[in-house]
């Protein structure tokens, strides 16, 4: 059977390498509706970006070869080669697998998002889109592109996945990086090995990756969640575990992604694990996750000072939720870091 352009991107490394990178970020807009292309092109040019356009996935693959874009914004529903197929084609080639791709879609269900994630999409924008949101997401992904151009491929993949979460909610900005750094520091304090510390670094970044499958209306809700909404939020641990299972690079972080909301008394989720059933690395990230949430402002609450947050963790120890040794060592670490900062 003859392979189409969407079955294989067939991108020449020589062709991509031959294209000279531009100082001005270049964005490829892919849509079969001229009015949508004109709108996106106008918004992006106003921000100072160079814009290349394509009417379908086949033409987009050719433009990637000749124009070396820094970002692709593609409609999902297109005849011939749709956005999912385009995404898979670009992500399957070593030369373009780190190229950020935003899928613009009117499909709001979790299944469509999971399909996009499986295809390798880095972000999503729902129709009709907010111009301010579009500009913010484009800036974030172009910033990531600059970083990934300088990073090792494995680290770049991790950052690409993490950015999908960070870019969606301004109130969680920096959360994953803080968990990564504190997790590694606590692992070192506990005398863990190099591999475990590296897993804590990656697990801190990726612990909430499953939230890419949670609707924005719930994930970004400024008020407290209803019981039904919280039940949906809790599925992010299962979604994240499923996503990480597809990458052998991330096999060590799966226990963190799935179990960082477990409690030692069995009242956590998703599996209700008890005591030593809860993986140690997941316990570490879970403690730091609670601390960071307590010390960060949200639309519905103020940030607690360090001492108050540590008192809350101590109360969770009394309830049987947390390991007393881990909480004690983390409290000592946080005090030391606070003193160093002064």
Image (spheres, rainbow, N blue to C red):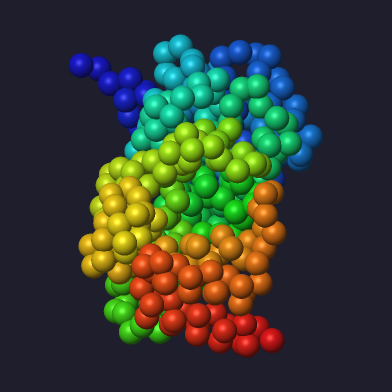
Report the side of 145 relative to 267 (left or right): right
The image quadrant of residue 129 is: top right
Residue at the limit of the structure toward the right, as seen here: 46
The image quadrant of residue 28 is: top right
> Viewer-proximal residue, 299 or 42?
299
| Residue at left offset 44%, top offset 81% | 328
Report the side of 159 relative to 146 (left or right): left
| Residue at left offset 55%, top offset 74% | 311
Q: How many labels does the image show?
A: 0
> Viewer-proximal residue, 326 or 167?
326
Residue 293 shows in this picture? yes
Q: Quadrant of the C terminus?
A: bottom right
Report the side of 95 relative to 331 (left or right): left
| Residue at left offset 29%, top offset 52% | 272
Residue at the limit of the structure toward the left, as seen here: 1
Residue at the limit of the structure toward the front, as seen here: 319
């Amino acid at each position: 059977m003859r392979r189409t352009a969407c079955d294989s991107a067939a991108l020449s490394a020589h062709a991509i390498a031959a294209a000279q990178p531009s100082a001005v970020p270049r964005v490829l807009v892919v849509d079969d509706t001229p009015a949508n292309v004109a709108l996106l092109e106008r918004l992006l040019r106003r921000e100072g970006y160079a814009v290349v356009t394509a009417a379908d996935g086949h033409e987009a693959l050719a433009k990637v070869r000749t124009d070396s874009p820094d970002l692709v914004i593609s409609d999902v529903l297109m005849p011939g080669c749709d956005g999912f197929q385009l995404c898979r084609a670009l992500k399957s080639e070593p030369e373009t697998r780190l190229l950020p791709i935003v899928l613009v879609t009117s499909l709001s269900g979790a299944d469509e998002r999971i399909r996009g994630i499986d295809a390798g999409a880095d972000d999503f924008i729902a129709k009709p889109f907010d111009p301010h949101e579009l500009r913010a997401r484009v800036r974030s992904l172009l910033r990531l592109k600059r970083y990934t151009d300088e990073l090792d491929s494995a680290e770049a993949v991790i950052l690409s996945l993490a950015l999908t979460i960070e870019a969606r909610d301004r109130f969680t900005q920096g959360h994953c990086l803080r968990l990564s750094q504190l997790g590694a520091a606590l692992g070192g304090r506990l005398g863990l090995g190099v591999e475990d510390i590296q897993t804590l670094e990656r697990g801190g970044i990726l612990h909430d990756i499953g939230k890419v499958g949670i609707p924005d209306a719930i994930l970004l809700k400024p008020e407290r969640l209803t019981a039904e909404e919280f039940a949906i939020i809790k599925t992010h641990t299962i979604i994240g575990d499923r996503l990480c299972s597809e990458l052998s690079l991330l096999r060590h972080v799966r226990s963190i992604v799935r179990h960082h909301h477990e409690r030692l008394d069995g009242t956590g989720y998703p599996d209700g694990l008890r005591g030593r059933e809860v993986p140690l690395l997941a316990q570490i990230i879970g403690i730091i996750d609670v601390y960071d949430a307590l010390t960060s402002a949200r639309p519905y609450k103020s940030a607690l000072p360090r001492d108050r947050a540590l008192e809350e963790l101590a109360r969770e120890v009394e309830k049987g939720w947390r390991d007393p040794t881990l909480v004690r060592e983390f409290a000592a670490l946080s005090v030391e870091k606070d003193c160093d900062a002064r």
